[in-house]
Image (cartoon, rainbow, N blue to C red):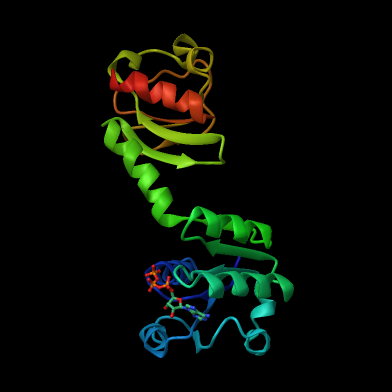
Amino acid sequence: MKQQFVVIGLGRFGGAVSRTLIELGHEVIGIDRNMRRVQEFSGMLPFVYEADSTDEAVMRELGVHLADHAVVAIGDDLQASILTTLILKDIGVPMVTAKAASEYHRRVLERIGADHIVQPERDTGIRLAHRLTSKSIVDYLELSPDFSLVEVVAPKEMHGKSLKELNLRAKFGCNVVAIRRADNSVNVSPMAEDVIREGDVLVMIGSNRNISRYEKRLQE
Ligand code: ATP
């Protein structure tokens, strides 16, 4: 379904978000207080405005309150990021995603009602560290402070064995929620009888503690 997004702050992060939303067929209004950034995006986004997002009246004039989803992509100016998020929630934007530059910034954004908070540098650092520790880790994603998802190339000792035989849930407390085959097909609800083949990637969900236990086992 086509959605109406507002992206505030057209830096590298906000720029990438806007560009991708347009490619995915959504409507995007881009806002930045820097005229150079506005000019840079004017050919790509149908609506780009030079405005200060901490001015509530201007936000209303631009129709920001009518958007389904706003992304606050201001990182460095803490005050502007916080004030903008507050205004967006006050004027009734149903979904506000905000970028946090630090843990304290994230906590403040949470308190003032941001619906979703991202910390791109922190998240990328965590993912990279997991991938660096083992060649078999394809990807790592924190789902919540307690649970993560990891994509692992099935090690040799798993080949030819069924999920039932492997019994990863009992051994490591991890659930295999999908298997990506070497031909890129994906089995999204694997059965106990499904057999692991060479080149398979297992998508597993578990508590952070259990996922770490399994990752350590892969390094042995
Ligand atoms: P990135 O890390 O995404 O490359 P950046 O380092 O260029 O961003 P940031 O300080 O994170 O800079 O700000 C991102 C963008 O947000 C900048 O283009 C800046 O002009 C814009 N911006 C900052 N404050 C406001 C504001 N109050 N209103 C509108 N735009 C703003």
Of all residues shown, which one is farthest toward the top? 165
The structure residue drawn at horizontal position 57% and vertical position 41%, both measured from the top left corner, is 144
Query: In screen coordinates, is 198 left or right of 31?
Result: left
Vertical relation: 163 (above or below) 178: above
Quadrant position of residue 27:
bottom right
The structure residue drawn at horizontal position 44% and vertical position 69%, both measured from the top left corner, is 76
Quadrant position of residue 1:
bottom right
Q: Nearer the viewer, residue 158 or 218?
A: 218
Decide if residue 146 is in sight here.
yes
Where does residue 163 sit, x and y in percent of width and height?
47, 16
Vertical relation: 165 (above or below) 64: above
The structure residue drawn at horizontal position 53% and vertical position 19%, both measured from the top left corner, is 173
Decide if residue 187 is in sight here.
no
Q: Nearer the viewer, residue 217 or 54?
A: 54
Where does residue 98 sit, x and y in percent of width and height?
55, 63
Where does residue 212 sit, x and y in percent of width and height?
43, 26
Vertical relation: 62 (above or below) 189: below
The structure residue drawn at horizontal position 40% and vertical position 82%, both measured from the top left corner, is 41
Query: In screen coordinates, is 14 left or right of 207?
Result: left
Where does residue 90 sit, x and y in percent of width and height?
73, 73
Q: Nearer the viewer, residue 219 or 3?
A: 219
| Image mark count | 0
Query: In screen coordinates, is 47 left or right of 40?
Result: right
Vertical relation: 193 (above or below) 34: above
Quarter of the image where ligand 1 sits: bottom left
Quadrant placement of the C terminus: top left
